[in-house]
Amino acid sequence: MFRLIFVAQLPRVALRQSTRRIPLLSSIKNKYIGKNLFIRGYAEHNINSTFGNEIPKEVANLTLNDYHNAADEYLENLVTGLEELSEDNPNELPDVELNHGVMTLEITGLGPYVINKQPPNKQIWIASPVSGPNRFDLYKGQWISLRNGLNLTNLLTAELQQAIPGASLGDI
């Protein structure tokens, strides 16, 4: 004998002033079999960050082409700055690589870093052995975390200075 079990019932998304349509799953009671069934529809809502804050229009309206141009330029400038720092400090920063939008670097005493483009979200993500994972949006010409307001270049500089006192990435 089989039993129909619904693992989770998703709550309805409240309707708000619309700026974007999102998929919605909800359940209704089927009058013929007396069971809840999922239905698919759409709800409209404001675009919010993971903490419920409004995402600035500049971030939300960034085109994919502008994102790629800005992210590629930033990562190229960053890898250039890190390679120069590596030449001066080969023991502390032995390896820096950038391939297809994914940068890897190893900092002696801290560990490995991965910095990469996330085109679906139009973000740059970082996996840091010091501060953990974070994601950055292009806001007012800089890569800023909407979660905590950190600037990506400032975060990297502060962490680099733990291994290489006086390290600077300059104006990236």
Image: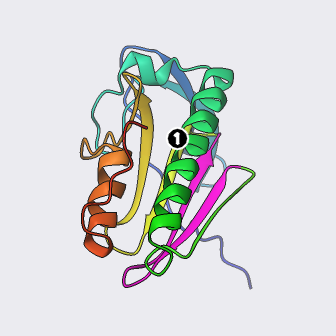
Residue 90, compared with residue 73, is above or below; it is below
- Relative to 153, 30 lies left or right: right
Q: Position of residue 88 (x, y in %)?
A: 46, 66
The residue nearer to you, when weighing 125 against 43, is: 125
Residue 103 appears in the picture as rendered: yes
Residue 30 visible in the displayed image:
no
Percent from the top left, x then y, of residue 132? 37, 68
Q: Main secondary structure of the magenta part?
A: strand
Tell me which segment is drawn in magenta. 101-119
Q: Is residue 163 above or below residue 126?
A: below
Label 1: few (<14), some (14–19) or many (≥20) C-alpha neighbours in 10 Å: many
Residue where numbered disc 1 is placed:
123
Count the marks: how many?
1
- As drawn, the residue found furthest toward the front would be 88
In the image, 36 versus 113, the foreground residue is 113
> Does 58 sit above or below residue 98?
above
Image quadrant assignment for residue 171: top left
- Type of colouring: rainbow
Q: Which residue is drawn at the image coordinates 65% and 40% (left, top)? A: 119
Magenta-span inclusion, residue 104: yes
In the rendered structure, does residue 83 fall within the stretch colored magenta?
A: no
- Residue type marked 1: Gln
Q: Position of residue 2 (x, y in %)?
A: 72, 80
Q: Residue at x 52, y 20 (%)?
A: 20
- State which quarter of the image contains the C terminus: top left
Quadrant of the frame with the N terminus: bottom right
Q: Position of residue 156 (x, y in %)?
A: 36, 56
Q: Nearer the viewer, residue 30 or 138?
A: 138
Question: Callout 1: helix, strand or loop?
Answer: strand
